[in-house]
Image (cartoon, rainbow, N blue to C red):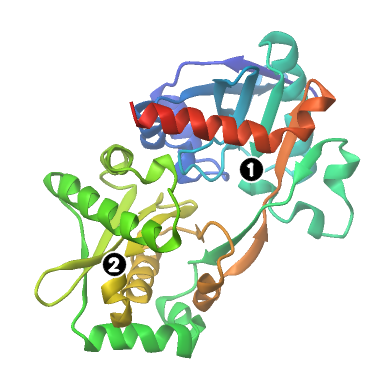
């Protein structure tokens, strides 16, 4: 089946179509697009047409790193997944076929040399029946593992699924210590919350002896929260009885799609009070009540297993105009992060 691709300027009708798509997630919303623009990202929006009829959209980003590249999602922004947002459900094989046609179109008509896709709808693609779909499609890909929590069961079922010793015990202890979880619900509170969250992140990064990512800087946290507020961002902080904020987290979501664990951190001196487990549990409860589906935790850190997540394989699929570029994906990522880092420190 032949598809055509047409660059477009976003319209209200486009965002409405994406919100009704079976591929809907926070990363296909007008609010997330606004956040990316505030981060300086050159977004690429295209209509996907089949037999001249609108079939869906492609959402990605353009970047010049010595060579012209297109990535979906944009790197270094906390965007976990983007790519195709189709109006009707399609199979994973059909999705790969569309990406192949898109790559040929970008290489021929847009002077692009490199296309990189991380599409959550391709999760576990090679694990379904054991057949190597991606290999057969003659594209290069790298494995990417993450944990995901299904928030569709009832709150009681979600609680029962938590590990007792490593999670339920900690939540109950935090409550006995008098810790409370506060949700930021007013626009004028966001700046103060972003500052406290930035301090929590800096404390965490010092413990890990790491510089962190650009998206963890105060101005980027502020841009995210202001762009997604209200209705698409859950800002939580754990406070002691005396009002001191000791942990905080940001979760981005839509009421009928996939949510993401954007970032969370706590102060080391108060970790014995178990604020992190209480924070994540309250996020799970709230997102469940807001109607979110899967909660992408991002990565496979051992501590996330206490929330009884499912291990998900989401491939990073790469199309290259020149075969030599397939071997420099790591270098492209490092180049991009250096550019973003310099831009955030000017």
Where, quadrant-wise, is the N terminus in this rendering?
Answer: top right
Q: Which residue is mark 1?
A: 119
At mark 2, the secondary structure is: loop
How far across and how far down the image is residue 322, in percent? 81, 21
Where is 128 relative to 69, above or below?
Answer: below
Where is 63 relative to 24, above or below?
Answer: above
How far across and how far down the image is residue 280, in percent? 38, 69
How far across and how far down the image is residue 279, in percent? 33, 70
Q: Residue at x 40, y 42 (%)?
A: 215
How far across and how far down the image is residue 308, in percent? 55, 76
Q: Is residue 145 visible?
A: yes
Where, quadrant-wise, is the C terminus in this rendering?
Answer: top left
- Tell me the crowding category of disc 1: few under 14, some 14 to 19, or many 20 or more residues within 10 angstroms, Cα based: many
In depth, the one of 74 and 149 nearer the eye is 74
Given the current orientation, which residue lies at the most extreme left position? Answer: 242
In depth, the one of 109 and 219 nearer the eye is 219
Q: Residue at x 78, y 34 (%)?
A: 327
Q: Are marks 1 and 2 in contact (CB under 8 Å)?
A: no
Q: Which residue is mark 2?
A: 267
At mark 1, the secondary structure is: loop
Q: Give the left or right position of residue 170, taking residue 117 as reference.
A: left
In depth, the one of 273 and 111 nearer the eye is 273
Q: Residue at x 32, y 60 (%)?
A: 203
| Distance in Å between CA atoms under marks 1 and 2 | 34 Å
Q: Is residue 34 visible?
A: no
Q: Which quadrant of the figure has residue 183? A: bottom left
Q: Residue at x 37, y 58 (%)?
A: 206
Q: Which quadrant of the figure has residue 108? A: top right
Q: Which mark is residue 103?
A: none
């Amino acid at each position: 089946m032949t598809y055509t691709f047409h660059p477009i300027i976003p319209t209200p009708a486009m965002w409405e179509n994406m919100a009704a798509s079976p591929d809907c997630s926070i990363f296909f919303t007008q609010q997330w697009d606004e956040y990316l623009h505030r981060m300086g990202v050159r977004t690429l929006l295209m209509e996907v047409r089949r037999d001249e009829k609108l079939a869906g959209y492609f959402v990605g980003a353009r970047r010049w790193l010595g060579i012209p590249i297109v990535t979906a999602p944009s790197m270094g922004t906390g965007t976990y997944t983007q790519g195709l947002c189709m109006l009707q459900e399609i199979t994973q094989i059909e999705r790969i076929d569309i990406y192949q046609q898109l790559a040929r179109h970008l290489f021929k008509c847009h002077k692009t040399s490199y296309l990189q896709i991380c599409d959550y709808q391709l999760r576990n693609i090679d694990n379904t029946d054991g057949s190597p779909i991606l290999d057969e499609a003659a594209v290069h890909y790298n494995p990417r593992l993450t944990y995901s929590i299904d928030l569709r069961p009832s709150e009681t079922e979600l609680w029962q699924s938590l590990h007792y010793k490593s999670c339920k015990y900690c939540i109950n202890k935090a409550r006995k210590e008098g810790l409370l979880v506060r949700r930021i619900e007013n626009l004028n509170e966001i700046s103060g919350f972003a500052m406290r969250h930035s301090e929590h992140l800096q404390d965490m990064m010092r413990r890990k002896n790491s510089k962190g990512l650009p998206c963890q800087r105060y101005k980027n946290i502020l841009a995210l929260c202001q762009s997604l507020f209200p209705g698409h961002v859950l800002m939580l902080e754990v406070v002691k009885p005396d009002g001191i904020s000791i942990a905080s987290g940001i979760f981005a979501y839509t009421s009928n799609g996939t949510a993401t664990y954007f970032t969370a951190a706590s102060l080391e001196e108060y970790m014995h009070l178990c604020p992190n487990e209480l924070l994540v549990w309250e996020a799970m409860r709230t997102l469940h009540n807001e109607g979110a589906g899967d909660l992408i935790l991002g990565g496979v850190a051992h501590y996330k297993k206490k929330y009884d997540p499912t291990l998900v394989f989401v491939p990073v699929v790469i199309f290259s105009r020149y075969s030599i570029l397939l071997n420099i994906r790591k270098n492209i990522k490092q180049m991009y992060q250096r550019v973003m880092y310099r831009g955030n420190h000017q």
